[in-house]
Amino acid sequence: MAKKKKQHQDRGTGGGSTQSLPWKKNDELILEIENMGSQGEGIGRADGYALFVKDALVGDVIRARIIKTKKQYGYARMMELIQPSPDRVEPACPVARQCGGCQLQHCSYPRQLAWKQEKIAHCLQRIGGLDVRLPGEKSSDESAPLERDDVGRDTGTPVVMEPIMGMQEPYHYRNKAQFPVGYDRDGHLVTGFYAGRTHQVIPHTDCLIQHPCNQVILDTVLTFMKEYQISAYCEESHTGLIRHILIRVGKATGQVMVCLVMKGKKLPHAEAFVERLLECKLNDEKFSIASICLNVNQEKTNRILGNEIVPLYGQSYIEDSIGDIRYRISPLSFYQVNPEQTKRLYETALEYADLQGGEVVWDLYCGIGTISLFLSQKADKVCGVEIIPQAIENARENARMNHIHNTEFFVGAAEDVVPQKYAESGGRLRADVVVLDPPRKGCDEKLLETVVRMEPDRIVYVSCDPATLARDAKYLCGKGYALKRVRGCDMFGMSYHVETVCLFTQLVGGSTDESS
Ligand code: SAH
């Protein structure tokens, strides 16, 4: 230990050998946290060897115990906080450290936002190879800070990010929660959240980033299950009935959906279940239960939802609205979890799309048509593509419900549907604007290739993972597009996730990548 501490004083001189590691499991050391990893973990360096520490924050000095070593880096646990970072705050939630849901409750909200913005910039710089600067950051060869108007006129010009859009109230923002059901060590039925990287349920029904209605609903479901001896599902043995409780809240409409995810197709005493839920008094008068349903998932899988929905009460969807548009949302459909920030995100996408009224827009990965319908009011035609059939059903209904007639929706993987439509058109399919809003893994290259062939003037990329965004940005920038605008939007306060909107415009003269 003494030796280790001595070695640690040389920290920062760099170049720890990868042959004989300077540290081994269970070593303890004093560590200053200098950086943050992509999942919000603190990073400190000991003899140049990077250690990742969950719940540690830049500026903290901690006593850490090494829990795992790898050749280039290791993991350590924070044993004692010796000197807190100036950005450290007391987590508001009592289970913040055990629960895998929030990673940054110990970090002040302004610092969370700054970190998320830096994360986007670093990804675009390092993975995308793009000259992206933080808002107001000085360029190395100019003395004046770059202003937005200087941005990206030519390919060589740095792109200055627009300031990240933070939330007004970074708690109670989510409109969707999926609570696992299980048993604690004493065999008591519990619901809550999975501990980080495990499937152990941390009992907790009062999650601070969720809607306050959830607590009453969860307590009602647990009481019902106990009274009628309805079992919770057990992953290891693949036995038991109730897997998850899915709750969705339409924040604008007050409609609430409760959906039990079950291994079986039939819920015993279903009438009593419905009665209980309808009787329960939600702790906000604006909200009432509009839909109760079952989702059947009989597979031995990590996936939460199965494909079959059995309605028990009301419709098997709820409605919500963002701006002037009303949306119908089924349990299987993707819908952004933070409606207040979604509105700002879509407004940014709309601004970047710069529609004049005559454009043909393709909205790829369109979900229930949220962005499509938002843009349709300013475009000639919007075509949406989405892989989940129920989401496309919702999208079509949503268009009808909002009296929107200039949209068309296609079911299928975007990387199949778009190349197929392009081929069917004999290579004549064109778009003025393409919106890409893929899941975390980003876009398939086959899709990007076809998008480039469709020669849109503008590509608006909405991303929930800066790393895959940066990878795809690199591709587009090698194929005749330039990154012009970037803006972060925090949809997920207290977590490490961040949403980004980017605008790419077509360079006159086309591809810069001669090799293809
Ligand atoms: N634009 C929508 C949805 C974005 S989330 C909104 O803002 O609400 C990403 C969507 O992509 C999800 O609806 C998911 O079901 C869908 N998806 C995932 N893989 C896909 C693929 N290969 N092709 C098309 N859609 C896909």
Image (cartoon, rainbow, N blue to C red):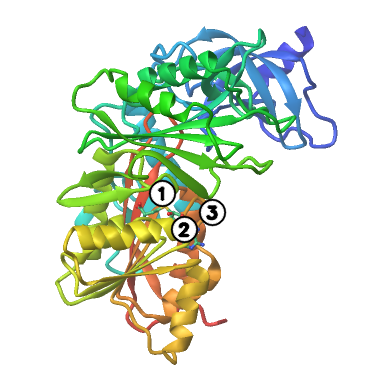
Question: Mark 1 to mark 3: distance in Å?
Answer: 15 Å
Q: Earlier in the sequence, mark 2 or mark 1?
A: 1
Report the amino acid beneath label 2: Ile
Of 48 and 42, the residue lying toward us: 42
Of 290 and 85, the residue lying toward us: 290
Label 3 neighbourhood size at 10 Å, few (<14), some (14-19), many (20+)? few
Q: Which residue is mark 1?
A: 334
Q: Evaluate whether residue 195 shows in this view.
A: yes
Label 2 neighbourhood size at 10 Å, few (<14), some (14-19), many (20+)? many
For label 1, being within 8 Å of ligand 1 is answered yes
Label 1 neighbourhood size at 10 Å, few (<14), some (14-19), many (20+)? some
Q: Secondary structure at mark 1?
A: loop
Q: Which residue is mark 2?
A: 388
Q: How many marks?
A: 3
The location of residue 297, given as percent across then percent down, is 59, 42
Q: Is residue 138 left or right of residue 21?
A: left
Q: Quadrant of residue 409?
A: bottom left
Classify the position of the N terminus by image quarter.
top right
The location of residue 371, given as percent across then percent down, is 29, 57
Of 219 and 9, the residue lying toward us: 219
Q: Are marks 2 and 1 in contact (CB under 8 Å)?
A: yes
Question: Mark 2 to mark 1: distance in Å?
Answer: 9 Å
Q: Are marks 2 and 3 in contact (CB under 8 Å)?
A: no
For label 3, being within 8 Å of ligand 1 is answered yes
Q: Which residue is mark 3?
A: 441
Q: Secondary structure at mark 2?
A: loop
Q: Is residue 301 left or right of residue 209?
A: right
Classify the position of the C terminus by image quarter.
bottom right
User: Looking at the picture, does residue 172 appear above or below residue 499?
Assistant: above
Q: Earlier in the sequence, mark 1 or mark 3?
A: 1
Report the amino acid beneath label 3: Lys
